[in-house]
Image (cartoon, grey):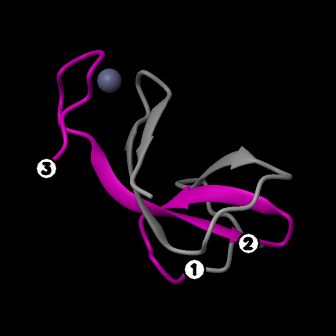
Amino acid sequence: MQKCPKCGKYMEEGCLNSGGGRILWSRDRNRMSSWPTPDDVVLHKHLRVKSSTTAYICKKCRLVIVEY
Ligand SMILES: [Zn+2]
């Protein structure tokens, strides 16, 4: 478990998915990023990372920690 460096609460584990010209955070590792759900967070529309990168998110602080 990863704690948020800002508020100290546990962060939600998911991953960054790239595809369709954008990156989003999602709980589901293999989801198509072209179809975001309300639970997903689109980070950047024109940035590319390797697909399925583990990432922790704190939606309250709007903070994402990415392992690469
Ligand atoms: Zn936080």
> Magenta segment, which residues?
1-30
33 horizontally vs 5: left or right:
right
* Direction from residue 10 to residue 51 in the image, left or right: right
Quarter of the image where ligand 1 sits? top left
Residue 4 in the image: state x and y as whole percent. Answer: 26, 28
Q: Which numbered disc, 2 or 3, marks the residue that appears first in the sequence? A: 3
SS assignment at label 3: loop
Q: Residues within 10 Å of mark 1 (few under 14, many from 20)?
A: some
Q: Nearer the viewer, residue 55 or 12?
A: 55
Tell me if label 2 and label 1 are in contact, CB under 8 Å: yes
State the image quarter where residue 60 is shown. top left
Say the numbered circle drawn on residue 1: 3
Q: Residue at x 59, y 75 (%)?
A: 51
The amino acid sitting under disc 2 is Trp
Determine if the magenta segment contains residue 23. yes
Disc 2 residue lies near ligand 1 with CB under 8 A: no
The quarter of the picture where the C terminus appears is bottom left
Residue 29 point in image, percent of width and height: 45, 77
Q: Circle 1 is placed at which residue position?
A: 31
Where in the figure is residue 2, as x and y percent of width and height?
A: 19, 43
- How far is mark 2 from mark 1, CA to CA? 8 Å
> Is disc 1 in contact with disc 3, using a CB cutoff of under 8 Å?
no
Q: Residue furthest top?
A: 6
Q: Is residue 4 within the magenta segment?
A: yes
